[in-house]
Amino acid sequence: MPHTHTLPALANATAGNAPSENPPAGNTLAENAVDGHETRERDRADLVALTERITGAGHPLIDTPEWLTHTLDASSRLPLALRALLRSFRHDPGPDGVLLLRDLPVAGAEPLRETPTVPGSVERVPTTAAAVVSLLMIHLGEVIAFRNEKGGALVQNVVPVPGKEDSQSNAGSVLLELHTENAFHDNRPDYVGLLCLRGDPTGDAKLCTSSIRRALPLLSAATRHVLAEPRFLTEPPPSFGRLGGVRSAHPVLLGASEDPNVLVDFAATHPLDEGAKAAMAELREAFVATMTPHRLRVGDLAIVDNRVAVHGRTSFTPRYDGADRWLERVYAHLDNRRSRVSRTGGGAVLD
């Protein structure tokens, strides 16, 4: 029997509690949409030619400084239409906090290999897909990774892994709760890029996004006030392994009250009192009411502004037959100076 496609109502606003299977009243996953930008054939051809500068025999591996330098240089030659979209999104992520680029190239002359199924799957050798997502993300900011997550690989595979079905991580296939990426971390990414190499053959798996810009008007003034106070704690996700404890108490809404950033993980953020718990539940209901589903197809790149948008995924049933859903994920920072103390030798990986 296939899994449900809905994001369930928040039963308990603390990590470790199983969510209810009852969807919020009146919510469907077909009410909202984010416009996708189709890549023109000419731009697609130019992008393929550009990837050839940083892939193939004789090129350094992805995680070396040399490859990032080549990628940064090549990104200045991206097709003008793509550069304009990225620059506009960087200036203002819009009401949804998501940029959806379609029909990007993901494979060269060789056919795409089977979907990986091993834990911690990453890309080390530069491929067409890895080059495309890296070129676009490095044009937004500085590509980064985290040492405790998949060994600090810059290009990470988001694939279902046998035995990890119930995990609240990129390896799971149960409903993945809405969250700010790496919400527990002081230097969390500003942008999360998710490039689809292979769609879910069942059609069940959907990336779900919601923006605080759309959700904020649905919140009461009292709830906004509570969410802006340091009355919440957030744990690391399973993908980071055991880091021991949580960061200090933090607010969920940060910055300008009329246009705040959001910092929450509904699977890992703990409200510290009953008022905070109620406010977090109201926030989640607002996110679900304004949520947008994305059934990513091959060549789709969804870039999520991790400051104003949260994302998750509906549940699905993997087949583990080499044809399961496969995304490649890359993070980007706007300001590398803020994390310099955590990046040994000034590299791209945060310790």
Image (cartoon, rainbow, N blue to C red):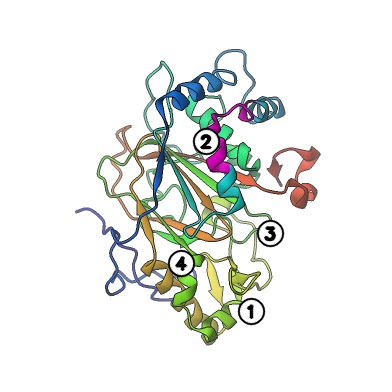
Q: Identify the residue under disc 1.
A: 229
Dot 3: within a 10 Å radius of its alpha carbon, few (fewer than 14), some, or many (20 or more) residues? few
Q: Does residue 77 show up magenta in the picture?
A: yes
Q: Quadrant of residue 175?
A: bottom left
First reached walking from the N terminus: tag 2 or tag 4: 2
Q: Identify the residue under disc 2.
A: 82
Label for residue 186? 3
Q: Quadrant of residue 115?
A: top left
Q: Which residues are magenta?
A: 74-86
Name the amino acid type tagged 2. Answer: Leu
Label for residue 62? none
Apparent side of residue 30 relative to residue 180 in the rendered image (left or right): left
First reached walking from the N terminus: tag 2 or tag 1: 2
**Cα distance in 3D space between marks 3 and 4:** 25 Å
Label count reads 4
Q: Position of residue 265 (x, y in %)?
A: 52, 64
Q: Residue furthest top?
A: 57
Q: Are marks 1 and 3 in contact (CB under 8 Å)?
A: no
